[in-house]
Image (cartoon, coloured by chain):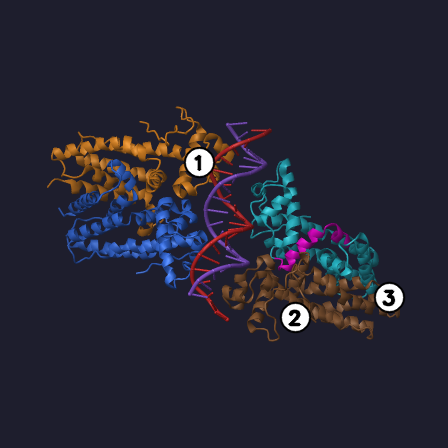
Chain colours: A blue, B orange, C cyan, D brown, E purple, F red
DNA sequence: GATGAATGAGGCTTCATTCAT
DNA sequence: CATGAATGAAGCCTCATTCAT
């Protein structure tokens, strides 16, 4: 699955893509994720990204001609990672098991890719200027498919009647918060960061809430 | 209740903050909230804030000498708004009613103060550099108080055993998302923005999930 | 007479125009004329203009926010100077005298404002990107008026039949060349620059050629 | 006839220039003429020239090591084209016929090589930094030879007494203007470009003016 | 209080040119 | 021949902040 981030009709202007040296691209995108997720688009500087990537600024600009291109490059990748977990939820499965698994995948994503999650959050927080189109088309379609799965469960009486969309919004928010708001969470928990145990407990709490909360009466 | 935003040992640089807050200060902070919440700290410019406030840049800087001061001024206010809803949750009340009411207050906040919510979210997303201290002290204490309330309910067998902190994290995330991520949500719903009905449905969905999910077996 | 240099509908973005300190504007435009006329738009740097004007670059940019604005400011002025001499040619006058006077005014302009002439020449040489619209409207109308004068003379039998437009083109080229191509001219004359005498002789040569060349047979 | 463009004592840096000029060099110089004449020296980029020439930038730089070299390469060629028409004017011929023929050749040059004309004009407009030396030596000598021809005519009473140099300046200006200032001329004529008819009329107007203007009384 | 002027620092980007293969 | 990589220098422009009135 590849989602295109169009920019006024243009393709994303990544430069080459050929040659072994487009290993550089990876390095750059990784560095960019680190910097963008921490400082936001405006707060990030090309200089800083270059420094993290271990390249000269001019060299970095040889691969991506504009800051925006780097940003879009990162966004593209994350977008795909964001949608993936949703795909696996199947109508044939047991609702409880399927939902627990989905929540598990989302929590794992927060634990393993917190920067990606924050990057994505920042983009949306600012009004999703570069994502809106994709969300309204591809992503919306993906979500609708999964909403249909939930509706099927409801019709079969496997779960209580609930708005599938808002169910997703709750799950997204409650899982992503462990990446996006981890600084607040760990501060409140009085820790320096979130441990595997914290994530496990988060997963358990949310899963229980959702699965029990959905049990038909 | 007044929470102090310390800044690395310095005094809080917010200028006066007497009881009768200068009308201008209010105007400025409102404008600043609008601009910061949309563009982030780095993306916001004093010029833009001044324009929204209807002042000249120089005049604005007469009231707040540094960009950071404006930001802290806004943050200060929001911080208080953020904590308030939590206060009202009382141990004596019925858990279901209390939680529904709390969720209601949080959702209302998202509906009525989306910019404030986003401002706050952005700050935390960036690692809460200016908030960490306050969170680790005052806020944490506040939360602990309410966690005690939840624990009391659990002990009385009124609700199922659950980690109170994670319960809060879920509620915060799931309510705030309707402000912070509203661009994504409305895009997925195929709308141009969220209506009162959307918020009502969000509140209902979340409340049901939480309250039913917490019912003792 | 004021000719507007529109820029995609926008007004020319000169900043203030108020206050005594818009004396700075004059200083800047003078400096800009000097630099642009020598190096062209691309070759000129804001730094250099600022240096000539005796201002810091940042200060200069306080008055004109973009290089283009400075350029347009200069162009605006020159445009008016360029048209002026044409105005005075009157149908009632004696053709010979009128033409000699016009040529005289044009030669004087080349002598007194060589930089303005070269600036104008450069703009047109590059395809008149910023002037085309004005030329096709206002300037064209001005020229047409004077062409009518020439036609009147022809009809009265005062001068030989000639295309008035091409007559103007010849006069413009032949007078402006003493400013625009002065480096070539003085090099060929083996001098270091053109003297008043050179200009006088140029004027005489051209005037004689034109006036005699137009005498009815 | 070959005119050398010296560059501050250095050797001319144009690369080979053997009889069989590399096909590539021609391609490059043609592209360079196109780009330089449109954007000026500073405004032109090697990338753009390479693109027009259908080469990679690096490859282009293999043929000409510096931007300046490309420029000089173009200038060299144009210089020769510029002088040529002058050569043919002969003392033995009839002045009227000779002058008409010369004007015809110059007008034809403007029509057939407008970019070359503009390139040349730009160089001179900027003070002819790279041409001055050549002009003061070779070109000046060439012109002096032809001035002698004119003087011979004057002495024989075939034409009126006139300054031969200024006569040339007028002819050059008035013919080249149809290339250099064509954007202005066509704008004033309300056309999109100059047609063969326009050039014919230009030639006729100028020739008549000059020839009649020179007739002895 | 209010504001016009001024500026240093820094950010993005372009570009000629060099280097290695 | 050809070209992908790399880079230093410079140019335009933004912006927070200071200063003087």
Q: Main secondary structure of the magenta part?
A: helix
Q: Label 1 lies in what chain? A: B
Q: Is residue C114 magenta?
A: yes
Looking at the rendered structure, whether the residues under marks 2 and 3 are on a common chain is answered as yes
Res D112 label: 2
Query: Label 3 vs label 1: CA separation?
Result: 79 Å
The spot of residue C188 in percent (x, y) is 76, 61
Q: Is residue B152 magenta?
A: no
**Which residue is pictured at 14% across the width and 47% down the height?**
A215
Q: Secondary structure at mark 3?
A: loop
**Residues in magenta?**
C107-128
Q: Secondary structure at mark 2?
A: helix
Pointers 1 and 2 in contact (C-beta within 8 Å): no
Decide if residue A60 is on the left or right side of residue D124: left
The spot of residue A159 in percent (x, y) is 16, 50
Per the image, the residue denoted by label 3 is D160
């Amino acid at each position: 699955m590849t989602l295109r981030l169009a920019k006024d009709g243009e393709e994303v202007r990544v430069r080459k893509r050929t040659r072994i040296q487009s290993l550089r691209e990876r390095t750059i995108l990784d560095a960019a994720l680190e910097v963008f997720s921490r400082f936001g688009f405006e707060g990030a500087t090309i200089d800083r990204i270059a420094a993290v990537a271990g390249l000269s600024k001019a060299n970095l600009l040889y691969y991506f001609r504009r800051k925006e291109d780097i940003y879009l490059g990162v966004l593209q990748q994350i977008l795909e990672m964001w949608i993936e977990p949703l795909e696996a939820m199947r109508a044939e499965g047991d609702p409880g098991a399927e939902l627990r698994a989905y929540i598990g995948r989302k929590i794992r994503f927060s634990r393993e890719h917190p920067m990606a999650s924050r990057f994505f959050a920042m983009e949306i927080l600012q009004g999703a200027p570069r994502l809106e189109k994709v969300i309204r088309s591809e992503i919306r379609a993906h979500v609708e498919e999964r909403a249909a799965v939930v509706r099927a469960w409801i019709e079969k009486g496997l779960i209580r009647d609930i708005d599938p969309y808002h169910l997703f919004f709750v799950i997204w928010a409650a899982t992503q918060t462990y990446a996006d708001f981890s600084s607040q969470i760990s501060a409140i928990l009085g820790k320096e960061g979130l441990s595997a145990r914290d994530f496990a407990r988060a997963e358990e709490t949310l899963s229980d809430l959702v699965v029990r909360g959905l049990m038909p009466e």
